[in-house]
Amino acid sequence: MATTMPAANPSLDPTRPGRAPRPRRNGRVRTVLIVIALAIVSVLIMLPFIWMVSASLRTQGDIISNPESLWPSEFTWSNFTEIWNRVPLARQFLNTVIFAGVVTVLSVLFDSAAGYALARFDFPGRNIIFIVIIVTLMLPFQVTLVPIYQQLSDLGWINTYQGLILPRAADAFGIFFMRQFFLGLPKDLEDAARIDGASELRIWWRIMMPLAAPAILTIGLFNLLANWNDLLWPLVLTTSTDMQTLAAGLALFKGQHVTEYGVLMAGSIIALAPMVVAFVIVQRRFVEGIATTGMK
């Protein structure tokens, strides 16, 4: 007589569609907890920006009486109109665009050319030059501020665009960054171009520069942000409000005893907006440039 096996309990079958595997459920819970933790950290990091937006929409009395509040007791747009009446904001915005934009373009060209030469050309003293460039990274900018100011004063370049721009036309970090990126690119493309009769300048401009687009965008964004927000250098080199940049112009609202927080925060939002747009546009290539730059 054939014996029949008892049927398995369908509720214990792990392959049934209605039963989710426990590891997958644990993974989802872990993901939710990570997202919540990151959201909390993001809000904490954004608190200064949130307070800045709130202060730009509040009166001076409201800010002084209740500085820890993030919600205005009375909304006002007068700070945004007042900032245009108190300083030549349009002129200072133009000065900042010229200063930061030209410095960014020149630094990208000079840093990439120097980085390419240090990465690809074998010439006497190459390693010494590279070590000297690295050493300059350790020097604070304030150490060279007085000698540079004296030289620019002798040239009559105080309160001029060339005085603001030319000392910032190249920097050690940009040269180091571009050198490391060029070291990670294959040499076969250059050798093929040389066989076809291309000059070194053409190889750098037509072949290497397009390949280094992520690194170029990264260096460009670094320089644009640094010079757009720079306060000390424009404040030292400019003596009139018509030549000041946004950072130097907004510093006028920071008094020794009284600070006009509402007007200052409104101007800060106006100055911050272009940089936020620039970062949103190039953020993907910016991360790519950081990730693909080797430390050879």
Image (tube, rainbow, N blue to C red):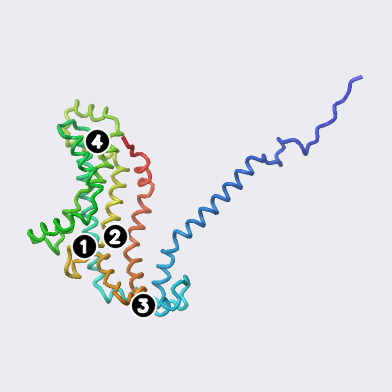
Point out the tag, 3 or 2, that comes first from the N-terminus: 3
Location of the C terminus by quadrant is top left
Mark 4 belongs to which amino acid?
Ile
Q: Nearer the viewer, mark 2 or mark 4?
A: 2
x, y percent for residue 224: 28, 54
Q: Residue at x 49, y 56 (%)?
A: 41
Question: Upstream in the sequence, badge 1 or badge 4?
Answer: 4
Mark 1 and mark 2: span between their CA atoms?
A: 10 Å
Q: CA distance from mark 4 to mark 3?
A: 52 Å
List the residue tagged with mark 4.
207
Q: Is residue 41 left or right of residue 208?
A: right
Indicate the quadrant where residue 203 lies. Answer: top left
SS at circle 1:
helix
Q: Alpha carbon of mark 3 to alpha carbon of mark 2: how far?
A: 24 Å
Q: On the image, numbered disc 2 is attached to which residue?
A: 229
Helix, strand or loop at label 3? It is helix
Say which quadrant the N terminus sits in.
Answer: top right
Identify the disc placed on residue 30.
none
Rate crowding at label 3 as few (under 14), some (14 to 19) or many (20 or more) other CA atoms within 10 Å.
Answer: some
Q: Which amino acid type is shown beneath numbered disc 2?
A: Asn
Sequence-earlier tag: 3 or 1: 3
Task: Give the residue furthest to the right.
Answer: 1
Which residue occupies 51% across, 53% down?
38
| Residue found at the very far bottom of the displayed protein | 61
- Residue at image mark 1: 234
Name the residue tied to disc 3.
78
* In contact (CB < 8 Å): disc 1 and disc 4: no
Q: Secondary structure at mark 4?
A: helix
Which quadrant of the view contains residue 161? Answer: bottom left
Residue 141 as seen in the image, left or right of residue 38: left
* Percent of width and height locating residue 202: 18, 36
At 38% across and 47% down in the image, what residue appears?
A: 284
